[in-house]
Structure formats: structure tokens, C-alpha cells
Image (cartoon, rainbow, N blue to C red):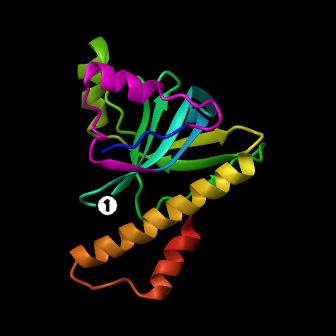
Amino acid sequence: MMQNVRAGNDGTFIEEQHRAMNNQMTGEEEDECLFCEFAQLFEFESATWKGRGKGNLRINRNMKDHRARLVMKGHNGLHLLLNANLWDGIIFSKMEGTTHGLTFACVNHVRPSGQAKKEEAEKEEGKELTTYAIRFREKNAGKQLASFIECTKDCLVELKRENKKEAGEGEANPTEAAAAEEQV
């Protein structure tokens, strides 16, 4: 069951309260939240960075298959901004021009809504990697970035172990696990 997690210093549980009141399913019911901080999301589009919104950025891990994903919901907790699987080759780099941001490439699986739903769903079938950036609050940037990177490393090492088990290759050796950690 999804934990109530306090985002940053603002202490809001808007999303959890709304879900409880309306008995809504979010797809996170079987997830555990490993990381949650308030951040701003940007997408690199047409050679410029475009703001996509502010809200709680989470690393969620499914309790059954242990797969991890990045989930970001808008500040009010009701609008999904990012839903991307963490994968073995994902690389996070420091964001240029700031000390409290990261860039990365991923496939965002946010489902479109409204009239554009059909058109967007057709486009999504052939979706490619898109470059995103996340920027944390300035005052706690160092702690937030370190926590995010550590959590991501742990998820990627566990994912690599799970993939090895599924492929019948046994446990990943320590050298491969260390290499997975260095990629982040």
C-alpha cells in the first residue's frame, strides 16, 4: 500500500487525502515510495527547456516485481507529469547552469486525456527517449540530490540482480553491481 510521504518542508498530503476521500485507484497501490521531494520538471523540446510543472517527484518500487519508476504529480497531486521506468542504462547528469538539478533521458508513459487522447495514444506507440531535467529547491539541494542519486543507485543495482535471476544467470557479481552504481 502506498505510504503517506511528506514532500519537502511544505508538509502537504493533498494527493493522499484526495484519493482517500474519493476512493480513487492511481496505479500506485502496490508500490512503496523510496524517495519523495518537491521538484520542478523540464522537458527539452525544440532546442529549449520547457517547464512541465512543479510537484512531488517520487521513486516508487513495486512490491511484487521490484521494478522501480519515477513518478511526478503536479503540486495539487492530481495531475500526472511523469511516469517513467528506471532502466539499467539510465544516466543522470548534473544540470548545466545550476547546482541543484539533474538531466536524464527516459520514455514518459503519461497517458493523455481529453479529445487529443486518440491522436496522442497513436503517437505514443512509437515513443522514443526524451530528455528531462528535474530541479530541486535551492536550500536543501545538496541533501535532495544526494538522496535521489543514492536511491536511484540502489534501485538500479536491484534491477540488475532481478534481470540476472530472470535470465537464469544467477546473482550479479560484485564488479557488475559496482559498475551499475557508477552509471548513476
Q: Residues within 10 Å of mark 1 (few under 14, many from 20)?
A: some
Indicate the amino acid at tag 1.
His
Q: If the image is split into quadrants, where does the C terminus sit?
A: bottom right
Name the residue rendered at 26%, 25% in the picture. Answer: 24
Q: If the image is split into quadrants, where does the N terminus sit?
A: top left
**Drawn side of residue 28 relative to residue 11, left or right:** left
Per the image, label 1 sits on a secondary structure element best described as loop
**Along the line of sight, the residue nearer the viewer: 116 or 28:** 28
Name the residue rendered at 22%, 74% in the picture. Answer: 166
Residue 112 in sight here? no
Name the residue rendered at 36%, 33% in the picture. Answer: 110
**Along the line of sight, the residue nearer the viewer: 3 or 130:** 3
Q: Is residue 150 magenta?
A: no
**Drawn side of residue 94 relative to residue 51, left or right:** right
**Along the line of sight, the residue nearer the viewer: 12 or 27:** 12
- Read off the magenta span: 7-33
Picture quadrant of residue 101: top right
Q: Position of residue 151 (x, y in %)?
A: 52, 59
Residue 70 in sight here? yes
Name the residue rendered at 35%, 75% in the picture. Answer: 161
Q: Is residue 27 magenta?
A: yes
Q: Residue furthest top?
A: 115
Q: Which residue is mark 1?
A: 66
Q: Position of residue 156 (x, y in %)?
A: 44, 65
Q: Position of residue 128 (x, y in %)?
A: 39, 44
Callout count: 1
Q: Position of residue 67 (x, y in %)?
A: 33, 58
**Along the line of sight, the residue nearer the viewer: 22 or 147:** 22
